[in-house]
Amino acid sequence: MTQNILNTPNKPKSILNNSQTKSQINPKEDTLGTILPKQAATLPTTSVQKTPKSQVVAVKPNDIVPSKSIYQNANQVLRVVSINVNGLRAAEKKGFFEWLAVSDADVVCIQESRITHEQWADKFRPKGWHTHLFAAQKAGYAGTAIYSRLPFVSVVDGLGFDLADSQGRFICAQFDLSAQGIDHPVYIASLYLPSGSSGEDAQARKDLFLEKYRHILKQWRDENKSLIVCGDYNIVHKRIDIKNWSGNQKASGCLPHERAWLDHIYDELGYVDTFRVVRKDADIYSWWSNRGQARAKNVGWRIDYHACSPDWKKRTLNAWVYKDSWFSDHAPVIIDYQL
């Protein structure tokens, strides 16, 4: 376990412009009677309509991510974000930390941090956030981090095998949410699963990781841990999760045995893809190739997940993929949970 770097939390900023009033927000009713923003806009625009905590707000793929003020009891909502930043230093230059300040996020799980502890300067550790970095032994490679408005009880680095630990591919933070009515420890983790796209050797390493990690996932279920594992899994699950299904059947990330691995952890071990609990729509992805105008054409893959223990299924309120700003080739996957 490495030392946590803690900053004194400040109250999160509102993401409603000071000059904006309720009359400037033009909501409309969908067929379920829930309040929807009229059109996509930048993050500072948000709905201020109050929604009962038990009611899910249906939001289309290109709609904005509202602030937590849409809930009657916003302090009882946990907003968790997963994002592969493809390098924290690069993401910082693209406005990642400005977005983080107004995101209303409570816990942010970062993959591919690509930064050493020596490079992890104050500008990468903003005030008001508890932060923890697990860097890869190789500089400029892999790595994970967690940023949290909530204090950590503890943070554990690694999974106990070299392929994960030497590359900083997993960290897990424990939280005490007893003040919010949860009387057991809650664990939120950031996972960066290897890619196998560079060749047979890379795929073999990925498959080895999957096999070792599968046994750890089973152990956690046997221990009945309350767990949210956010991350870049580098695997699509179903046809709905990839634009070009037929053309990628032999591509790493869409191989039958990889998708069967996800079937196993969801269908047999009992973990839950909480994004799909509330979002059944197609054509919503979290990663796009930098080639062939894939992002502009929305030719994407959904490979970033919140894989949760079963107790989080009933707590899942809303889920979004944020695409108003781009910090890397991945987009933030944002899910709100009822505490």
Image: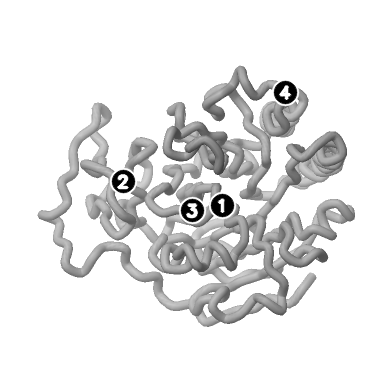
Residue 259: x percent and y percent?
70, 27
Regarding residue 275, the answer to whether it shows in the image is yes
Marked residue nearer the N-terminal end (3 or 1):
1
**Which residue is labeled 1 in the image?**
82
The residue that label 4 is drawn on is: 250
Q: Residues within 10 Å of mark 3 (few under 14, many from 20)?
A: some
* Image position of 51 with respect to 3: above or below: above
User: Helix, strand, or loop for circle 4?
Assistant: loop
Question: Which of the marked residues, 3 or 2, is nearer the chain's N terminus?
Answer: 2
Q: Is residue 230 above or below residue 291?
A: below
**Which residue is disc 2 drawn over?**
52
Q: Amino acid at mark 2?
A: Pro
Picture coordinates of residue 290, whole percent (x, y): 55, 43
Mark before the other along the chain sequence, 3 or 4: 4
- Residue occupying image coordinates x 53% and y 41%: 286
- Where does label 3 land, which residue? 339
| Residue at the image point whose x is 86% and y is 51% from the top | 163
Q: Which amino acid type corresponds to the residue marked 3 in the rendered image? A: Leu
Name which of mark 2 and mark 1 comes first in the sequence. 2
